[in-house]
Image (tube, grey):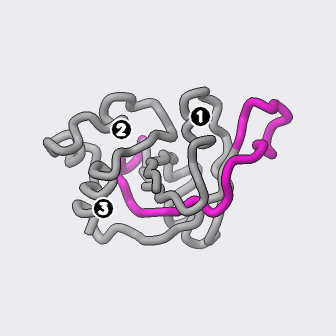
Amino acid sequence: MNYFLVKSEPFKYSWEQFNKDGETLWDGVRNYQARNNLKAMKKGDLVLFYHSNEGKEVVGIAKVVKEFYQDPTTDDERWVVVDLAPVETFKNPVTLETVKADPLLQDIALVKQGRLSVMPLKAEEFDRLVELGA
């Protein structure tokens, strides 16, 4: 099992809309490192959903339901998407401030590479964020 975090601005695509949709393709990634992280996702992997810009908080858990394929929003073959489905909403969203203050999360990509939209997480980082969100 691998773990990831994806970021979305709530006004573009919110956790609430994701739950209403029940499943979505994760498109629009135009950064090579983020694209490579999408390619590393396997069916069943768990993914934390982070509201960026507004809110700046981890709000829930999703899972990969379809591995990477060509991004249908572009003809450029370099870009891919995965399909995600919501699993669980956090009772307590985990703010960026909380993440930065937690000694167990000091090396998380969310802090170290703040502009990256799709990032891997270590199992212990994922577990700690889930614990904080419970």
Above or below for 69 versus 29: below
Residue 63 left/right relative to 95: right
| Res. 99 image quadrant | top left
Magenta segment, which residues?
53-80
Q: Residue at x 55, y 29 (%)?
A: 33
Residue 128 included in the magenta stretch of the image:
no
Percent position of residue 50, x then y: 42, 51
Task: Please name the residue that numbered disc 3 is placed on.
Answer: 130
Residue 82 numbered mark, or none? none
Q: Residue at x 64, y 66 (%)?
A: 23
Residue 124 left/right relative to 13: left
> SS of the residue at dot 3?
helix
The CA distance from mark 2 to mark 1 is: 16 Å
Q: Residue at x 45, y 30 (%)?
A: 115
Which one is in front in this view, the residue at disc 2 or the one at disc 1? 1
Give the residue type that dot 2 points to.
Leu
Tell me the crowding category of disc 1: few under 14, some 14 to 19, or many 20 or more residues within 10 angstroms, Cα based: some
Give the residue type that dot 3 points to.
Val
Give the residue type that dot 1 points to.
Asn
Task: Please name the residue that numbered disc 2 is placed on.
Answer: 110
Marks 2 and 3 close (CB-CB < 8 Å): no
* Mark toward the start of the polypeptide (2 vs 3): 2
Percent position of residue 9, x then y: 50, 46
Above or below for 19 versus 100: below
* Mark toward the start of the polypeptide (2 vs 1): 1
Residue 36 left/right relative to 91: right
Task: Please name the residue that numbered disc 1 is placed on.
Answer: 36
* Mark toward the start of the polypeptide (1 vs 3): 1
> SS of the residue at dot 2?
helix
The CA distance from mark 1 to mark 3 is: 24 Å
